[in-house]
Amino acid sequence: MIFTDKYTLEYDPRKDAHRVHSTEAPLCPSCGFLMSGYDNRRRKAIDSTGAVYWLLVRRLYCPKCKTHHTELPRSLVPFKQYEAAVIEGAGSPQSSCPAEGSTIRRWKRK
Ligand SMILES: [Zn+2]
């Protein structure tokens, strides 16, 4: 898993998802080698209003390590559906987090 900070989103109506266009060179987190695009996959995301949207994230291939890595925009957290800002703000008094109470309690345990 690698993160990109510099990216744009473009809606793809055929996939019903926003394609993530990174402007950063994707470097392998293990060896630093420049990776190449392999394919895309759909990734669910939920924003602070509880609205669900889908992203098309790149899967990259490192020819040196012979492994695949997914490129996520920095706004997301690996293996979590809610945006990073939603998870960080959850449970604070001024937060209106759309997640269920049990989900917020699970986030805070870690
Ligand atoms: Zn590598």
Image (spheres, helix red, strand yellow):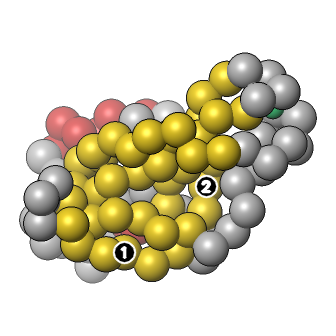
Most foreground residue, 75 or 58 = 58
> Residue 84: x percent and y percent?
43, 60
Query: Is residue 28 rendered to the left or right of residue 104?
Result: right
Query: Is residue 46 rendered to the left or right of residue 37?
Result: left
Quarter of the image where one finds residue 89: bottom left
> Residue 49: x percent and y percent?
14, 72
Query: Is residue 25 rendered to the left or right of residue 45?
Result: right
Q: Is residue 13 above or below residue 103?
A: below
Residue carrying label 1: 9
Residue at 43% across, 56% down: 76
Of labels 1 and 2, the one closer to you: 1
Residue at 57% across, 46% down: 37
Instruction: Assign a secondary structure to mark 2.
Output: strand
Most foreground residue, 83 or 5 = 5
Q: Residue 3 carries which label?
A: 2
> Residue 26: x percent and y percent?
70, 54
Say what amino acid the circle numbered 1 marks: Leu
Q: Is residue 82 above or below residue 106?
A: below
Residue at 77% across, 41% down: 28
For label 1, count other residues whose C-alpha is less than 10 Å away and answer few (under 14), some (14-19) or many (20+). some
Residue at 40% across, 35% down: 79
Most foreground residue, 61 or 7 = 61
